[in-house]
Image: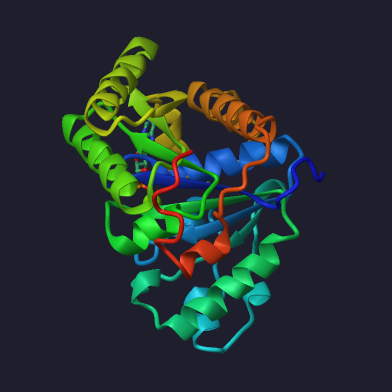
């Protein structure tokens, strides 16, 4: 299904604070994209705290470290996830991309770039926080899905992410996901607070992706490694992630093509085009 000119569409999942729900969001969005019929690849880009394979109950034989070591090709790392989802697993304790030598980075990104051409959507689960390597990986995305919970520290750290991302890479498309909200109204309020501050202090328009409720089914799904179950998509959180995915992909597909220089090669030239506004 080649619905846009530039393949693949790249969505990264970010957060200021750790433990807010990035990985479950990435996995659920990627599965939602599969249910919509898109060829979907998930890159576990949370180098050091990789756990996409664990959430899905998969056993990674090889990971990116093995590719960097020259032991295997990136194709050999591909895991078959549920519903036909393909996954590039990362290894725990792996150094951030920015810490890699340029030659290693080129080698890795070449491979990811090449392999992702065969997909409609590439989801990247990134690390928490504002480390250079994390911002860098997010900078290649067409849209950054920024996850926060209503917890004050999580919101403050989300704001810090927006601020530093804007400072270092210019105004990117960032859409907020208010996760673990106890009500729709609470989620909207979280968004509104952050959007107001971003507008006032950064003159930045923070997008709104949606609210995901705090749902005991999420933990059950994680514990039982059942994120892809048929029922999972009908839980309150599952429905929210489906809706967020549908809206996000539709809005990006319907957007007129941009001439922004983003893409996997941006990783090699991190500050290229930094001042370009969206
Ligand atoms: N919508 C939600 N409702 C309930 N619990 C959630 C929700 N989202 C995340 N969690 C809980 O938070 C934990 C951490 O989520 P995870 O995706 O691993 O965070 P991160 O990748 O940001 O570190 C999950 O195991 C789950 O228990
Ligand atoms: Mg995670």
Q: Position of residue 48 (x, y in %)?
A: 35, 67
Question: What is the number of callouts on the image?
Answer: 0
Q: Is residue 247 above or below residue 79?
A: above
Q: Is residue 213 above or below residue 226?
A: above
Between 109 and 239, the one nearer to me in the picture: 109
Q: Give left or right: position of 187 versus 121.
A: left
Q: Residue furthest bottom?
A: 70
Q: Position of residue 37 (x, y in %)?
A: 76, 39
Q: Residue furthest top?
A: 185
Between 125 and 171, the one nearer to me in the picture: 171
Between 211 and 163, the one nearer to me in the picture: 163
Residue 88 visible in the current orientation? yes
Q: Give left or right: position of 99 versus 13.
A: left
Where on the picture, by quarter, is residue 189?
top left
Q: How is the image coloured?
A: rainbow
Between 84 and 260, the one nearer to me in the picture: 260
Q: Position of residue 145 (x, y in %)?
A: 45, 39
Residue 226 visible in the current orientation? no
Q: Is residue 150 above or below residue 268?
A: above
Q: Residue at x 39, y 49 (%)?
A: 275
- Quadrant holding the N terminus: top right
Q: Residue at x 68, y 35 (%)?
A: 253
Where on the picture, by quarter, is residue 70?
bottom right
Q: Residue at x 54, y 69 (%)?
A: 60
Q: Position of residue 179 (x, y in %)?
A: 37, 29
């Amino acid at each position: 299904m080649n619905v846009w000119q530039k393949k693949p569409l790249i969505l990264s999942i970010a957060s200021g604070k750790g433990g807010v729900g990035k990985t479950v969001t990435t996995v659920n969005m990627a599965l939602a994209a599969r249910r919509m019929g898109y060829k979907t690849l998930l890159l576990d880009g949370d180098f050091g705290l990789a756990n996409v394979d664990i959430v899905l109950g998969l056993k990674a034989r090889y990971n990116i470290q093995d590719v960097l070591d020259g032991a295997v090709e990136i194709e050999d790392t591909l895991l078959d996830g549920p519903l036909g989802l393909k996954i590039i697993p990362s290894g725990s304790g792996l150094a951030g991309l920015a810490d890699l030598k340029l030659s290693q980075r080129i080698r890795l990104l070449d491979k990811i770039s090449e392999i992702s051409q065969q997909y409609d959507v590439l989801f990247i689960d990134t690390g928490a926080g504002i480390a250079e390597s994390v911002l860098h990986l997010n900078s290649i995305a067409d849209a950054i899905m920024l996850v926060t919970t209503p917890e004050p520290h999580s919101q403050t750290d989300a704001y810090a992410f927006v601020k530093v991302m804007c400072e270092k890479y210019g105004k990117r498309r960032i859409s907020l996901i208010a996760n673990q909200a106890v009500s729709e109204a609470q989620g909207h309020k979280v968004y509104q607070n952050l959007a107001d501050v971003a507008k006032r202090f950064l003159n930045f328009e923070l997008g709104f992706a949606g609210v995901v409720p705090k749902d005991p089914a999420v933990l059950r799904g994680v514990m039982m490694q059942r994120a892809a179950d048929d029922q999972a998509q009908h839980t309150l959180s599952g429905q929210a992630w489906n809706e967020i995915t549908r809206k996000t992909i539709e809005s990006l597909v319907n957007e007129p093509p941009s001439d922004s220089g983003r893409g996997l090669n941006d990783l090699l030239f991190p500050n290229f085009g930094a001042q370009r506004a969206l």
